[in-house]
Amino acid sequence: MRSRDADSVDVDLLEVERYACAQWPSLGDILADFGARFPVVGAGTTTHAVLACAGFLQDEAIANVNLPWPLAIEATRVRAGLSRVEFINDFEALAHAIPSLAAGALRTVVGGTTPFGVASGPVVVMGPGTGLGCAAVLPGTARDPRARILPSEGSHVLLATGTPREASILARMAHTWADVDVDYVLSGPGLLRLYRAISELDGLPQVLSTPAEVSRAGMAGESAAARESLEVFLRAPGQLLR
């Protein structure tokens, strides 16, 4: 990183690699493998790390119900061969990047053609993955122009519905999950849960077994249940912010 001034830095992206968490015994093993494969950021070169992870810090561990293994800070540091490890929420990290976005990087989806500036008001950053990540960016003030970042577990609120059909789907999902929260639906596993609930509701065979299969079949028009799953999935963020 090269410092521009007291409050900002230029960041160089050196290496990128994808890992499937379920195929590894721990995050420390993933980091150790990454360091071994890419010496420029490997052991002896990198001594400190900030890791952006889904979930929140609780008693020196990251609480995340979607990971296949516990994520302990000290065990991760030791296994990765680092001197110091800090954890922040993954969407907290994304929110820190928002004030640096150029106007050309923004796209208005609904509500007109004029780009909405990130400095003109509070911004909510959210996105589905293994769960639904959420964070907020509050603009600075005249006394302190720096943006304030608020990490959030805002996805753990009950899911709202907008139509009788959506209410029926929600009721079907409640057969296996008493309190259907946003995270339960707006996530990769949630897309599959939607597909299964809609298939059960309509008496259709469940021939798809992964979120990727549901997405592909829905976009290709090969499955009515998959298509509706995508439609409900894409409407849900708007209902969350309404």
Image (cartoon, helix red, strand yellow):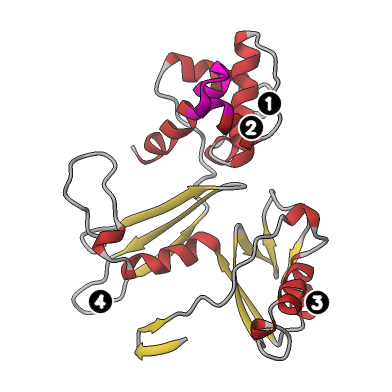
Name which of mark 4 and mark 1 comes first in the sequence: 4
Q: Magenta part mainly helix, strand or loop?
A: helix
Badge 4 crowding class, 10 Å Cα cut-off, few under 14, some 14 to 19, many 20 or more, is few
Amino acid tagged 3: Arg
Q: Nearer the viewer, mark 3 or mark 4?
A: 3
Name which of mark 1 and mark 3 comes first in the sequence: 3
**Is 120 situated above or below 8?**
above
Amino acid tagged 2: Glu
Q: Distance between the residues labelled 3 and 4?
A: 40 Å
Name which of mark 3 and mark 4 comes first in the sequence: 3
Tell me where the magenta segment starts and ends, as one range: 217-230
Secondary structure category for the residue under label 2: helix
Which of the 4 image quarters holds residue 24?
bottom right
Question: In this figure, which residue is indicated by the disc labeled 4?
Answer: 145
Q: Distance between the residues labelled 4 and 1?
A: 50 Å
Q: How far apart are marks 4 and 2 (CA)?
A: 46 Å
Amino acid tagged 4: Pro
